[in-house]
């Protein structure tokens, strides 16, 4: 464990953005940090890892970077192939599972995406990002009650998770509970006042409640924020 910590510290210092602001260094530093967090999870589950390269193999990193490049081009099928290659070497790399799930969701392959988010939550039960994305996926499947359970857990773990509050509001809206939806959108806006989507969604709720003037103000606010 001591040898691994030293290897991590050496790489972290080498690629830290404060030390070198070259293109790509910030991404590489984050990947090294993610790898070390994976190590900690391995250690907690008492899996035997003796080398830093066991959790940070260069070929897996290259595959992950290729996946990210494919995502940037919205080539989700290709990205999934590269995420799978990375996961062959790093099966507990939660960020790769998370990104693979998001790519699958964008392809409307929701059940496969849910498997990825559940994998993340097995690795890290307190991953609010996985809970949020799982909730969105369930919402897309119109399983609003189950989605709400995910958003509720995400906001319990992180009350400042404005995206989860927003999607919670969407679920309540679809369940025809406008008052609860309004509360959620207001919480999202309080946390992030420039959150245009939440302003737009709040306007939609107010319109359903017959408050046309207030709804128009929210929609105008959302429009101005998007400009």
Image (cartoon, helix red, strand yellow):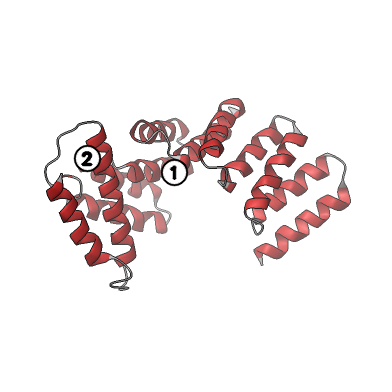
- Which residue appears at 26% of the width and 48% of the height? 35
Q: Does 225 appear above or below 214?
A: below
Whether residue 53 is visible to the viewer of this picture, yes or no, is no
Of labels 2 and 1, earlier in sequence is 2
- Horizontal side, residue 217 vs residue 112: left or right: right
The percent position of residue 161, horizontal first and vertical second, equals 55, 46
> Which labelled disc corresponds to residue 88?
2
The percent position of residue 117, horizontal first and vertical second, equals 41, 35
Q: Quadrant of the N terminus?
A: top left
Which residue was labeled with disc 1? 102
Q: Does 95 appear above or below 58?
A: above
Which of the 4 quarters of the picture holds residue 66? Answer: bottom left
- Which residue appears at 61% of the width and 42% of the height? 165
Nearer to me, 93 or 193: 193
The percent position of residue 135, horizontal first and vertical second, equals 53, 35
Q: Quadrant of the C terminus?
A: bottom right
> Which labelled disc corresponds to residue 55?
none
Which of the 4 quarters of the picture holds residue 19? Answer: bottom left
- Horizontal side, residue 181 vs residue 85: left or right: right
- Horizontal side, residue 137 vs residue 124: left or right: right
* Label 2 neighbour load within 10 Å: few <14, some 14-19, many 20+: few
Count of numbered badges drawn on the protein: 2
């Amino acid at each position: 464990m001591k040898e691994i910590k030293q290897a991590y510290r050496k790489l972290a210092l080498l690629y830290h953005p404060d030390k070198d602001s070259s293109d790509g260094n910030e991404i590489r530093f984050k990947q090294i940090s993610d790898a070390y967090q994976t190590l900690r999870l391995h250690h907690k589950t008492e899996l035997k890892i003796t080398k830093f390269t066991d959790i940070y193999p260069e070929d897996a990193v290259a595959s992950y970077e290729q996946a990210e490049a494919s995502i940037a081009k919205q080539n989700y099928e290709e990205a999934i192939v590269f995420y799978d290659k990375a996961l062959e070497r790093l099966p507990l790399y939660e960020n790769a599972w998370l990104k693979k799930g998001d790519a699958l969701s964008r392809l409307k392959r929701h059940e496969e995406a849910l498997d990825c988010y559940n994998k993340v939550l097995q690795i890290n039960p307190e991953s609010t990002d996985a809970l949020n994305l799982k909730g969105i996926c369930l919402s897309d499947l119109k399983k609003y009650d189950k989605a709400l359970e995910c958003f509720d857990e995400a906001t319990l773990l992180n009350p400042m998770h404005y995206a989860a509050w927003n999607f919670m509001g969407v679920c309540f809206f679809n369940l025809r509970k406008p008052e609860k939806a309004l509360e959620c959108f207001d919480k999202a806006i309080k946390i992030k006042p420039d959150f245009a989507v939440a302003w737009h969604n709040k306007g939609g709720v107010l319109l359903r409640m017959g408050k046309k003037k207030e709804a128009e103000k929210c929609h105008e606010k959302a429009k101005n924020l998007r400009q």
